[in-house]
Image (cartoon, helix red, strand yellow):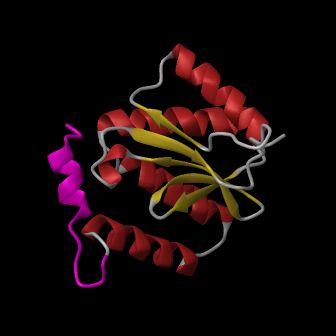
């Protein structure tokens, strides 16, 4: 996970479709998610599988985010989002974690979709880069999750 320009250029290589292999895999995951059963226990299982398949460092972050969501935003339901860990409100993804390895990036991202209430004036961040989750990052994530569902 060096994140060098060469690594990012490698991710950008595309096929005739114009999409990288990683982007095509994410689209296939999204199609499978739409076809999957919408029973909550199936969605919980899909999230658990998505998290379990991550490398150790990313899995630890995803597990921490999942624990934060379950404690501080229990109204959000488990969901996967293009094969990534996600949490939804009324069926729409509110929060997700994009692992660095998904697209061979230097860092993972915690992202918030429009259903999250992060509005702050005319401009506000909706994605946050993370390398690890220590006490300071955990505190910030808890604040963001609480604000997202307020």
Q: In the rendered image, which quarter is residue 24 located in?
A: bottom left
Estimate the x, y position of residue 4 in percent, counting from the top left. 19, 40
Residue toward you, 94 or 61 = 94
Q: In the rendered image, which quarter is residue 50 located in?
A: bottom left
Residue reaching furthest left? 6
Classify residue 4 as left or right of residue 123.
left
Residue 68, placed above or below residue 94: above
Classify residue 46 as left or right of residue 21.
right
Q: Quadrant of the C terminus?
A: top right
Estimate the x, y position of residue 101 in percent, counting from the top left. 30, 48
Seen at 30% across and 78% down, the residue is 18
Number of marks in the rendered image: 0
**Magenta-highlighted residues:** 1-18
Residue 74, placed above or below residue 17: above
Seen at 49% across and 51% down, the residue is 48
Q: Quadrant of the N terminus?
A: top left
Residue 15, placed above or below residue 94: below
Q: In the rendered image, which quarter is residue 40 located in?
A: bottom right
Residue reaching furthest bottom? 16
Residue reaching furthest top? 135
Estimate the x, y position of residue 111 in percent, counting from the top left. 56, 46
Does the magenta-highlighted stretch encompass residue 11?
Answer: yes
Seen at 67% across and 28% down, the residue is 142
Estimate the x, y position of residue 77 in percent, counting from the top left. 69, 54
Residue reaching furthest front? 122
Classify residue 88 as left or right of residue 83.
right
Does the magenta-highlighted stretch encompass residue 132?
Answer: no
């Amino acid at each position: 996970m060096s994140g060098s320009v060469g690594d990012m250029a490698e991710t950008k290589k595309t096929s005739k479709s114009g999409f990288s292999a990683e982007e095509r895999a994410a689209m296939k995951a999204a199609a499978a998610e739409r076809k999957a059963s919408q029973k909550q226990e199936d969605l919980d299982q899909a999230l658990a599988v998505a998290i379990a398949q991550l490398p150790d460092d990313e899995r630890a972050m995803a597990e921490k985010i999942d624990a934060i969501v379950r404690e501080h935003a229990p109204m959000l339901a488990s969901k996967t989002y293009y094969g990534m860990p996600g949490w939804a409100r009324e069926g729409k993804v509110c929060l997700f974690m994009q692992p660095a390895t998904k697209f061979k990036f230097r860092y993972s991202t915690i992202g918030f979709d429009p259903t999250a209430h992060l509005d702050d004036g005319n401009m506000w961040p909706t994605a946050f880069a993370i390398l690890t989750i220590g006490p300071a990052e955990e505190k910030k994530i808890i604040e963001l999750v609480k604000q997202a569902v307020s």
